[in-house]
Image (cartoon, coloured by chain):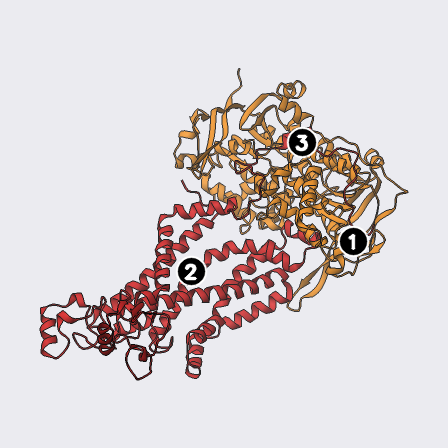
Chain colours: A red, B orange
Amino acid sequence: MDVKTLPKSVDSEIEPGIPEELKPDAEPAGPIGLTALPRGFEFSPLNARRWRNFKANKRGFWSLWIFLVLFVVSLLAEFIANDRPLFIHFDGKSFFPVVITYPDTEFGDDLGTAADYRDPHLQNFLKEHNATEIWAPIRFSYTTINDRPPSAFPSKPTWLLNAADCDFAAKNGYSQCGTLEYNWLGTDDQGRDVLARLIYGFRISVLFGLILTSVSSVIGIAAGAVQGYFGGWIDLLFQRFIEIWTSVPELYLLLIISSVLVPGFFVLLGILLLFSWVRLVGLVRAEFLRGRNFEYIQAARALGVSNGVIMFRHLLPNAMVATMTFLPFIMSSSVMTLTALDFLGFGLPPGSPSLGELLSQGKANVQAPWLGLTGFFTVALMLSLLIFVGEAVRDAFDPRKTFK
Amino acid sequence: MSEQLCLSVRDLSIAFRSGGRETLAVDRVSFDIVKGQCMALVGESGSGKSVTALSILRLLPYPAAHHPSGSIHFHGKDLLKLNEKQMRAVRGDDISIVFQEPMTSLNPLHTIEKQIGEILLLHRGLTGAAARARTLEVLTQVGIPDPETRLKSYPHQLSGGQRQRVMIAMALANEPDLLIADEPTTALDVTVQAQIIALLKDLQARLNMSLLFITHDLGIVRKIAQRVSVMKDGKIVEQGAVEEVFNAPQHPYTRALLNAEPRPDPAPPRPDAPMMLETTDLKVWFPITRGLMRKVVGHVKACDGLTISLRKGETLGVVGESGSGKSTLGRAILRLISSEGPIVFMGNELQGLKFKEMRPFRRNMQIVFQDPYGSLSPRMSVADIIKEGLKVHFPDVPDRERDERVVQALIDVGLDPATRFRFPHEFSGGQRQRIAVARALVLEPSFLVLDEPTSALDMLIQAQMVDLLRDLQKRHNLTYLFISHDLRVVAALASRLLVMRHGQVVEAGDAAELFRNPKTDYTRALFAAAFKLETAPEGVVAQ
């Protein structure tokens, strides 16, 4: 028989149907959905159970929500803390300074540089033209310097100012208490609003963590999959390579590289990526080593399914459970790494909003406890939330875990 | 009655809580075990027999499991009312248990001496020479050859049968009043099974011990038990003396069980049909390497010079003990493991073809594996599982037509096509094995390797599976290579027979003829163990 052609249908004398004697085999196949429709995007029963288990862990569930809300809020940082108004309307024209940079010639100046909306001159001009302005709740961006502070930098949170502080401001030529702009968490030692920097810093930390985690996971999973599936020499050589690679002192390398390259967001990401991808390799490799001799893998090979498809469709889902369990922890440690580097001064370039820099300012300015406390509580909250989520995910994926 | 009751279970129910749902696994069962007698608990998987046994020792995952009703009286004490400390004193001392899987019920990191010594230390405080003497005694009792040298062995150095003997020795160490044997032979070869049964029967009589024997094999019940209880869906549907129940079964389920022998009606040999498969001197040798330079010092000869031929429409039964190379042969033919020697399939030489070059042939040669739980990807729906082969071999066929073929294949194996969007875990073992057959059949192969397709299934379902395979063979003119250690099933299907031992052919020929006149002791021993549960003299088969 030619193996390429396929007979249209099997000719059979026997009428196809379900023979009666086969019925006793029909052990009840579980109470779950007897629908004859494909289950499209619905959760598989296994995932539904995991999701239930995850929700049953109240602490993890709420941590996830709080974290997501904080993250989404910080993604909209430009609309919450900005030194440009969200919207200006005057002379029948509308402006959206938050997204478009306008030259100050639009607002009556003649320098032609980007408009500085906090400039009193520009403000007066807008007032004269009866302009409508809509500002973000916080009128500072992460680089904005408060040029009318009540004291020398770092200055106190405005709501903490007492009579003595106001006296001091009045006597020493600082801004008077009644006329101040609010700095909810004070300013840092360069006069920038701490709350604004916090929001932007949170965003950059989480984004950095997310990107680092996902890219290093993809690389790690791929490397682990190849090693585990093919085994033999590939596995042996790769494992030795990883052993050598992981014994390279990461921090020193970082110091050397950052003295040559300007350590921007992506350079830093790249350097950390060089070392962080190994974390998942062992785990995924073990799963693939275990899984490659499963009978359903053998069956797929007997069907002639190619190696790539077997790895992706049959083995990867097995490894994903272990991987998913690890992800929140990897994420939190990525955030930690960035914060630590910033704290030491080897992280993001000067001026970027960063939690690590805030912490190091807190260390340098013990007389200004709002800096250190803010940094501490933010980092602690962020990491705790991630760990709680991680624990809940781990428990939800644990097949032995039973909830009462 | 003057008989002394050892264990008395009354109205025992067992329920499990999971995810807010309550499932009743065992529903008000009652039975007694008389001192010195053996009671068999029979039923299909999922009928609640193992759970019942475990609840006697309170080994269930409490508090997820609990007992809505009932009592378990053992020598006058209600075991369900004892606290954990009192219960520990009972476990392993008064009542002990032997599990099904000898591979996993021994700690791989402990020597035999340490495993048995632990129980002696716990319940009797024996250490040193006294413990060693007792350990040697029980090892001799369970028939471990040369027990002194075995004391320092680790579990992996023992065969499956020997491990099960060690498990029994552990259970016997403190001379329990009641031994619970939870399918102790299901994972073993037929020859070893016969030995273990003989051993348990002998020990029970000598030590005047009570035995609760859990099994799904009625042949064993007849051999070992005095009384039998038949369980179905968590209830005992019938109980009584073995002869009574077997001779005059009252409940329809018992009758169905008793009639569940696979019906022998093998495909006839066809000497004039076209040749399907031929191997000449097929070898699968795994090198044993030693030392730093990994020098090859020898080979494990899994298959050593096998010459087989198989014609279209025939079934070649391959039998032998575990480790005889049966499964290796099947996989070597499908080129799932590398081998030496020509494999000619439908006139084409397969040996030396690359993975890609093999692909066109794979459509015509398929395999069904032993374990219905392991051979289906748990994360794919049944439709996707069956469709996978079609995607590889008929990439141009539209999805709609593929779906029609999946439906046809499911109907062919007797499953409701509407269930194809479910996941494997929603099916029973027998249904899963049907899915595995459907996955192979959807490609319309002409040759099928069946690697112990029935040994993980209950008796009743085994018989159905045999009928299904025979039916499919007739309808589609299939050629089978049927690998099994269960000779009853092989006898029902095989037209020709190949008896293997240590990777070599011991005997081969027409199945009917071979079953009538086995020529070698080994074959005779296999047959006796399978059909009569009789043991062979030492040295003929593995111990």
Task: Provide the secondary structure element on which disc 2 rests.
Answer: helix
The image shows residue A36 at horizontal and vertical percentages of 58, 39
The image shows residue B6 at horizontal and vertical percentages of 50, 25
Position of A352 with respect to B304 (left or right) is: left
Chain of the residue under the numbered disc 2 shown in the image = A
Q: Which one is in front in this view, the residue at disc 1 or the one at disc 2?
A: 1
Report crowding for label 1: few under 14, some 14 to 19, many 20 or more residues within 10 A (C-alpha): few
The residue where tag 2 is placed is: A329
Front residue of B238 and B434? B434
Q: Which one is in front in this view, the residue at disc 1 or the one at disc 3?
A: 1
Front residue of A346 and B168? A346
CB atoms at circles 1 and 3 under 8 Å apart?
no
The residue where tag 1 is placed is: A4
Q: Residue furthest right?
A: B272
Q: Mark 1 or mark 3: which comes first in sequence?
A: 1
The image shows residue B107 at horizontal and vertical percentages of 54, 48
Find the distance from the CA under tag 1 to the CA under tag 2. Answer: 51 Å
Residue type, label 3: Leu
Residue type, label 1: Lys
On-image quarter of the C terminus of chain B: top right
* The disc label shown at residue A22, or none: 3
Find the distance from the CA under tag 1 to the CA under tag 3. Answer: 34 Å
Dividing the picture into quadrants, the one containing residue B373 is top right
Report crowding for label 2: few under 14, some 14 to 19, many 20 or more residues within 10 A (C-alpha): some
**B373 in relation to A280, above or below:** above
Find the distance from the CA under tag 3 to the CA under tag 2. Answer: 50 Å
Q: Residue furthest front?
A: A92
Q: Mark 1 or mark 2: which comes first in sequence?
A: 1
Position of A224 with respect to B278 (left or right) is: left
Chain of the residue under the numbered disc 1 shown in the image = A
Front residue of B115 and B70? B70
